Amino acid sequence: MIPGVEALLWGVAALMITAVLAVTLSRRSTATGLIYLITLAVCGFLLGIALWCLVLRPTDVTSTTLPVGLPWIGAHFRLDALSAFFLVVVNLGGALSSLYGLGYGRHESAPHRVLPFFPAFLAGMNLVVMADDAFTFLLSWEFMSLASWALVIAHHREPANTRAGYIYLVMASFGTLALLLAFGLLAGPAGNYTFEVMRASSPPAPLIATIVLILMLLGAGSKAGLVPLHVWLPLAHPAAPSHVSALMSGVMTKVAVYGFIRVLFDLLGPPTWWSSVVVLVLGSATAVLGILYALMESDLKRLLAYSTIENIGIIFVSLGLALAFQANGMGWPAALALTAALFHALNHSFFKSLLFFGAGAVLSATGERNMEKLGGLIHRMPVTSFVFLVGCVAISALPPFNGFASEWLIFQAILLSPDLPQWGLKVLVPAAGGMLALSAALVAACFVKAFGITFLGRPRSEAVDRAHEVDRYSLTAMAALAALCLLAGILPGFVIDGLSPVTQALIGGRMPTQISQPWLSIVPIAESRSSYNGLLVFVFITISASIAVYVIHRFASHELRRGPAWGCGFPDMPPDAQYTATSFAQPIRRVFGTFAFRAKETVKMTPPGDISPARLDVETHDVIWEALYDPITGWLEYATLKLNRLQFLTIRRYLTLVFGSLVTLLLVVALWL
Amino acid sequence: MKGLTFDIAHLLAGGLVLISFMMLYQDRLFALINVFALHALVLALSVGWQAYIQNAHHLYVTAAIALLFKAIVIPIGLHRIILRLGIHRDIETAVGIGPTMLAGIGLVTLSMVLMLRVTATADALAREDLAFALSIILLGLLVMVTRRNAVSQVVGFMSLENGLVLAATGAKGMPLVVEISVAFSILIAFIVVGVFLFRIRERFDSVDVRALDDHRGERR
């Protein structure tokens, strides 16, 4: 039997059964290990099949129909190259999260709130990627949302978590509504909801296509975290247990990206050039704002969540570029941009999971998420800090790691923009490139802060002082991700070639084959324009660093010397006097904060004779929340207060309401026909 | 013969609409129940005529049920209830008679315009029948809306059901099961509402539904 969509569905069924099993077992002490072991095995199985399909049979499309769901329609599932790629992302993240959960889950205070939903969440994400009709897609999407919502409010006794869960639920419902409307428009008046028919039907009218684009940006964008729909993400992702945060940030946002790609590149038909403008503008705004928020943040997990927003921005810029090139019939530049987007999605799932695992390790070792209370962990958790450093370097897009490879590809695509015929795009794309460059620099600053404040210096609280290295399962999961970050960085050619069937199927073009290049270089366009060799960079860095170390140790002393730190002349420096996360971000807050956050600094000097210290107060505003969400909640509150009177009518008035609405509907029919 | 059968069916259905109008301006409960009995009688005639012209014998059963229960048993039962409650002297209308009649005319116009346009391809008899039936349903709702007393709301509801039966019998080939279920639903509604009336009466000393609203602690 050729393993295809059926085998994958069996895996999903196994995950569902595991969820049920977890409900019955979850109060036992052995349940944690058992459940995560099963999910690890099942995700590994699914990953194996997806990789097998993507690498060995990339052009095969298998599909099946299950007799569940809507009567006489059933649930359609399909596996093509795009699904297979995203299945790899989902199940790789799922497998490593399960491995991490084997260790991290033991610290869980309420395992019965986490264990049943974890496999269900994984099953939901797998189903979304395989769905082949709108009904199944939406059902799986909502299932995924609800399972992750349950995980977000797993620790519901903290008031911040219930608020996060509430906002997440509202935004998720809104997003699903937008998707529902988008699929309704795609299905057209004939109302055939299978993707196969949507794909085959003639492209919709420009107005319909525009509305579908906007609805997809709202629906998929709210799940992925596009500004200004990102508000739930930095609240909800950190609220979940860390391995779930890793899944939500690293994997679920990619499922949203999958939905966007599936509709825009596969179902909607050929794009128009200005649709790419919308995506480019939103993507670059998301990238810059996301990382600015992250810089202002001193909660480690929230910082990572904001950084996810930034990476989604990068992916959407790249998708916008692909749309722009495709609209102008430029096959291989579109393939380059789409490959870059998918590659970055894969990379982000690696290093964001790694960083969330690291944050979880710090959290379980110290009980602290606030960076202002951490510090000095490099001596207490050496392995964690090393792999966290790898994640920071990778996300900051420094060679030889994977972040550099994918962002470099995106910039290669941006450099092709002068070939675009539209002047609007000729101007806009370099501007978006500038925004990306800015955000890349800010990311580096942000992760210098994240690593430096958390792991370097001296401990800022007692709990941190007593921290110990975490268990082996967690370390193995993190080390595996760090190795993947390095491998994808030094051998990007294999990934790019693995993605070529996806671009071939979606836009009919592909990048040149990379593994046949000498020395494993990647050459996206032509040797004369640009090429990059991660392996060579890695070898060079390793050799030069080894030589430097050798020279230093050969000609200088081997002795480790500890001396007193210079403390500006103060004799006894408390750990509080160290550089803090807020002070690290201060210069950037001064530069960007006035317009992005309406930041205001007030210095309150004490009057002469008063011996209390002077105060520096910083006031920042979440401009998007205040300008967009506060008015909406205000109107809603007003409207509900007004409509609340409907709850207290007399029986006769209720009858009158029913009567009135019946007559109105009849009138509408009478006037319409 | 075709012309005559059509005219008689038309006459009876139209008569039902006319009697529905009569219900609108009855401000005494006994008068309202009498008019309802008349309504049910004409319905029985109409259904009987349909049975004759469609040569559908099972419709005679429906006609008999309508005659027996709606024209005789239920009006007598309601008479007794009213006497036992001692509300036969009450005068109740929530909305003035003039506006009510005008609204009724508007509703009939609406249903005519709508039905004649929607069912352009259907058989002429069925078309007229459906238009009248919709008018009767809307007028029944109007009765329910314009009354405060629970008894007259029940009567309005039952005249609405008469409209449904008219629609069901006007269409050829409707199985008997449906009509029996409709008749039984009315019977059950009648019993339930009867019990309900006495419960309100026991508790609030009135069958005015305002008492229920007052009980919920509301003002108007």
Image: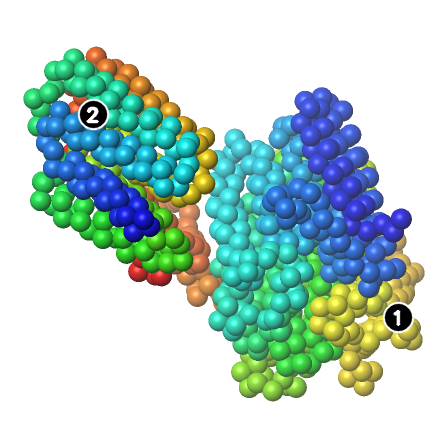
Q: Are marks 1 and 2 on the same chain?
A: no
Q: Pinpoint residue A576: horizontal percent, then vertical percent.
A: 57, 45
| Residue drawn at point x = 57 percent, y = 66 percent | A283
Of all chains, the one bearing label 1 is A
Point out residue A254 in the picture as x, y percentages from the top left corner: 66, 55
Question: What residue is pinned by disc 2?
Answer: B151
Q: How is the image coloured?
A: rainbow
Q: Residue furthest front?
A: B1
Give the side of residue A517 with respect to residue A478, left or right.
right
Label 1, on which residue? A515
Above or below residue A133? Residue A412 is: below
**What residue lies at 74% left-to-right and 63% top-to-bottom?**
A343
Tag 2 secondary structure:
helix
- Residue A356 appearing in the image: no
Q: Nearer the viewer, residue A370 or A294?
A: A294
- Relative to B79, is A571 on the left or the right? right
Q: Amino acid at mark 2?
A: Val
Q: Is residue A77 left or right of residue B129?
A: right
Give the vertical position of A278 relative to B7 (above or below): below
Residue A78 is drawn in which quadrant? bottom right
Tag 1 near tag 2, CB within 8 Å: no
As drawn, A274 above or below A35: below
Residue pictured at 23% horizontal, 15% vertical: B198
Q: Amino acid at mark 1?
A: Ile
The 10 Å Cα crowd at callout 1, few under 14, some 14 to 19, many 20 or more, is some
- For label 2, count other residues whose C-alpha is less than 10 Å away and answer few (under 14), some (14-19) or many (20+): many
Quadrant of the drawing holding the C terminus of chain A: bottom left
Disc marking residue A220: none
